[in-house]
Image: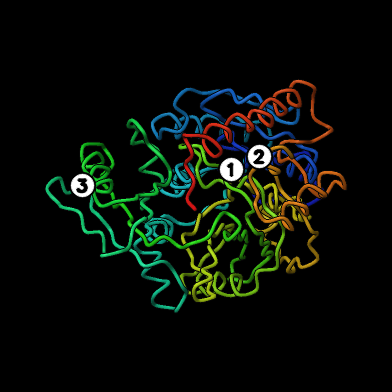
Amino acid sequence: MRPARPEERDLPRVLAPVILGSDFCCYAYIRCFWEAYGVKPIVLASADIKSVRSAFCDFRVIAGIDQPEVLLPELERLGDELIAQGKIPFLVGCGDHYARQVSEHKQQIEERWYTPYLDFELLDDITQKERFYQICEEIGIPYPKTVFLDCGDKTAQVDDGGFTYPVIAKPSNSAAWHYAEFPGQKKVYLIRSREELEALYRQLQDTSYDKLLIVQEFIPGDDTQIRILSTYVDAACDPVFMVGGRVVLEDHSPTAIGNPAVIVSEQLDQVSEDALRFMRHVGYRGMANFDVKFDERDGTYKFFEINTRPGRSSMFVHQAGVNFAQVQVDDVLMGKRIPRITDTKPFIYTTVPPYVVKRSVDDPAIRKQVLDGFKTGVTRYALDWPQDCARQRFWSKVTYYHQIDKFRKYFWGAGAQGLA
């Protein structure tokens, strides 16, 4: 049975955070839990990611942990074990597939665990991108013109909406996409002709992915037109924090395309207003991440999606001075009313070294801002934590400098995957 709410003074002794997944967001969580409570969370990962295997966590590799038939029994067993030790299990995760699994089985999981995830009915509704855009239409939030192709209909033909090419194609359901492995799989496709779109659609009709393929007008502009907003709203749908940034550079490798590589802090008043209006409209509670692009043709910020969990790049929230793990514990476990955090710090988040910035960012003012930040300490690598062990710091540097080869292959060279 799930333990009762503790006294706040007992949190460092009894709180037992468990993190599902082992990406950059996981490392941000590790750091947040240690700095807030002095506790080392347990990480349940499907692979040994050495750059994330911190001295400040208990890193456990469990084959198939991203599958419900493995995850749910493990959470039951581990929850009972922690409760027997006098601990309070607190479950968080990284990635859409974990968010969906925890949400779908939330009633069962909450017999033992506290967790900040949405109820499944709401999560399932708003993470279907066609439904997200429908809500945006209802409440007047700008979004790109979009059509949907049903990959479960094996006889359907392509409807490209009459858009001018190139167009963007991407899955409507990220969690289902995670499990549908096939040759050449990408997060996002830049489609340059109708023939290319037809070929992709035929390929998807032959896979296990039976959800919708989004075909969307291409919003012109390079990576510097992308904006990102990370936020947390409480049970009253009031914002605890809203931290925005301008994405200076994205990853361009096929399986990670669209992941922010450099983010510069930016006050996003209109984006924040629209995001809050969306969350209040649907009755949202918890952490969310919005992807947006500025459309210079009409001066609007077009919304692409909501992620119903912390984003992979959530270290930028920590860099802004917000401990987002503590916010979740205060709200979900402690039931505290948290005043809005507005005194955030300027930041520049990066996953790439200066050499990549020099070669990849065309805007001279932004390029100088990021490069100067390396010298002043404002620009910080997401996996750089001086307190961590030598092993983690070594592998984080390997990951860091490996980005040069990735950008050389996928952005500067013949294999470029750019969306601009």
Can you see residue 369? yes
Please identify, in this view, whether the residue under mark 2 or under mark 3 is nearer the observer: 3
Q: Which residue ends up furthest to the right in the rendered image?
A: 376
Left or right, residue 272 beside residue 209: right
Colour setup of the view: rainbow
Q: Quick one: label 3, few (<14), some, or many (20+) residues within 10 Å?
A: some
Q: Quick one: label 2, few (<14), some, or many (20+) residues within 10 Å?
A: many
Amino acid type, mark 1? Leu
Name which of mark 3 and mark 1 comes first in the sequence.
1
Q: Residue 152 bears which disc, if any?
A: 3
Q: Which residue is mark 1?
A: 91
Q: Nearer the viewer, residue 104 or 54?
A: 54
Picture quarter containing residue 201?
Answer: top left
Left or right, residue 143 beside residue 270: left
Question: Whole-percent x and y of residue 204?
Answer: 26, 41
Instruction: Give the spatial CA distance, label 2 vs label 1.
Output: 6 Å
Residue shown at the point (78%, 62%) measured from the top left:
344
Whether pointer 3 and pointer 1 mark residues with C-beta atoms closer than 8 Å, the reply is no
Whether pointer 2 and pointer 3 mark residues with C-beta atoms closer than 8 Å, the reply is no
Q: Which residue ends up furthest to the left in the rendered image?
A: 155
Instruction: Give the spatial CA distance, label 2 vs label 3.
Output: 38 Å
Image quadrant containing the N terminus: top right
Give above or below for 144 relative to 317.
Answer: below
Q: Which residue is mark 2?
A: 17
